[in-house]
Amino acid sequence: MRESGNNLGEKPKRNGNGATAATITRAIATTGEVFADGSTIELIGGAHDGNPVLMVWDGSKETVGARVEHHGQLYEPAPINSSILQELILPTRCCPHGNTRELLAEICKLVANLVGLDEKPASLVGRIVLCSALVDAVPVAPMLTIVGPDTARGNRLMALLRCLCRHSLLLTGVTPAGFCSLSSGARFTYLISQSTVSGKLQKLLDDTSRRDQKIPYRGGLLDLFGAQVIHAESIPFSEPLSLRSMQIPMIPGGAQLPTFDLDVQHRVTGDFQAKLLSFRRVNLSAACKLQFDSSKFTFPMRELAHCIAAATPDDAELQAEVFDLFRDRDEEIHAGTWIELSAVAVESILMACRESPGGVIYVGGLAEIAQEILSRRGGDSSIDPGAFGRRLNILGFRTEPRDAKGMKIRLTEDVCRRARQLACDLGVHQVGDPAPPAPAATGPE
C-alpha cells in the first residue's frame, strides 16, 4: 500500500470549501491506490472516449473523474496501451454485493451452471475470483491451472473468468519478453491460454508471484504481481509453481451447457464487476490483517492456504473450508516429503538427539542414519555424505571444524529444538517410522 502526501515547498491555495490545500503541479499516474486509512482509488471503465477514469472512495462517497484529488494530491490514469485497454475488463460502477458468503455462492453457482464443474472445483474457482479482488493483501499470488482433454469447456471457463476477475486480461502466445512488456503495477489477473508454457516463462511467472518483488527491465523495475490462471494442454510445472497452483481438471462430460454468448458475457461482466468492486472496498483492510492458522498444513502448502483463506476474510466458516478443499493435496505433498532429503535429515538429527542428548555426532554417522531411514521407506537413492552435510547447513545446523573423522555436530538443546521445529514444519511426526503418519490438515480445533 502506498500513502500519498502533499508536495512540499509550494504555496497553499484555497479549495472550493475555503480550506487550505497544497498546490498541485503534477498528477501521479496510477492504475489504483490503497491508502492506510482504507480509502482507495480505482480504475474505472465506460468513459465515452474509451479511456478509463478514476474513482476515489473515501469510505462514504465516490468521486469519479479523468483527474481526481485525494489527500492533497492529484491523480490521473496511468497510460496503458490502447490494444490492452480494448481487452482489459474494468468495472463501470459499484453496487452492493450482499455479504461474502452470498457473493461466493453466486459465483460458484454460475461456474457450476455455465461450465459444469462439481462443487469442490467450483469453490476453488470462486475463491480465485474473490482473491483477484483482494490480491493486494496477500504476499504470494495464487495460480489456477486448467488442464484436460475437454478444451471447449476449458475455453469457456477462461471466458467466464475474464468476466468475473478483477482487471482480467486474456492472453495467448505469451513469452517472457511479451509478459515484461505489460503495464507495471496494474494488478492484472493474467488469463494465459496456450498449448505450452516454457520453462523460462514458468520461472518468470513464479518470480512475479511475490508482491514485493520487482523485475529489472530496460533500466527500470517492473511490478507484474497479480493472480494467474493458465489453460494449457499439459503443464509439467516446476516445483515452485506447482506448490502455489490449484488444478481444475477438464474431463469430457455429456451434459449440455447453457448458452454463453457475448450478450450473456456482457451481462455477467456488468453485474459481477460492480459487485466485486464493492466486495473489495469492504474486505481489503480485513484481508490485509487476517490471522489464519495454517500450521496444520504441510509447510509447502501454507502460503497458498493463507492466500485462499484471505479471499473470505470476514467469514471464519468459509476459511475453515480451506482445510477440506486442500486435504487431498496436502496428503499428496506430505507423502512426497516422507522420502525427501530434508525430512530424512531432520529425522536423523532427532534420532541422534534422542539417543545421545548433549553429545557429538559426525556428519558421516548422520548420513548413515538417514540412509537407513530412507531404505526402510523404499527409497532407492544413496545419500552422499558431502551433499548431506550441505543440506544440514541449509537447514541451519552448523558443523564444527573438521577433524580426523570429518565434520561433526554438537547435539545441544538449541540443535534439538530446531530439529523439532523443522520436523513440525516438514510434517515429520514420528522418528524412523516406515510409513507416513495420518494426514495433518484435519480442520480447525
Image (cartoon, rainbow, N blue to C red):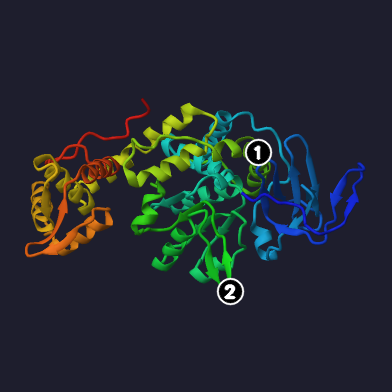
- Residue 117 falls in image quadrant: top left
Q: Nearer the viewer, residue 361 or 39?
A: 361
**Could you tell me which residue is drawn at 14 percent across and 48 percent down?**
348
In what element is the residue under mark 2? loop
Query: Does the CB distance between marks 2 and 1 fall below 8 Å?
Result: no
Give the residue displayed 24% in from the left and 48% down from the top: 336
What residue sits 79% from the left and 47% below the top?
64
For the residue marked with disc 2, what is the amino acid? Gly
Quadrant of the image containing the C terminus = top left
- Give left or right: position of 201 versus 266: left
Q: Which residue, given by chain and number where applicable, does mark 2 sit on?
A: 219
Where is residue 293 shown, x and y percent of the image? 41, 34
Q: Tell me which numbered mark, 2 or 1, is placed earlier along the sequence.
A: 2
For label 1, count other residues whose C-alpha is less than 10 Å away and answer few (under 14), some (14-19) or many (20+). many
Quadrant in the rendering for residue 299: top left
Question: Which residue reaches farthest top?
Answer: 445
Give percent across and percent down for residue 345: 18, 51
- Residue 35 has which mark? none
**What residue occupies the far bottom of the structure in this picture?**
218
Q: Which residue is mark 1?
A: 281
Residue 371 is situated, as x and y percent measured from the top left of the image, at 10, 53
Q: Tell me the residue at 48%/54% (across/down).
A: 210
Residue 220 image position (x, y, % from top left) = 59, 70
Q: Is residue 267 above or below residue 230?
A: above
Of 157 and 124, nearer the camera is: 124
Mark toward the viewer: 2 or 1: 2
Give the structural element (helix, strand or loop) at label 1: helix
- Compared across the picture, whether 357 is left or right of 101 comes to left
Residue type of the residue flagged with mark 1 = Arg
Q: Rounded to the nearest whole Å, what is the CA distance between mark 2 and mark 1?
A: 35 Å
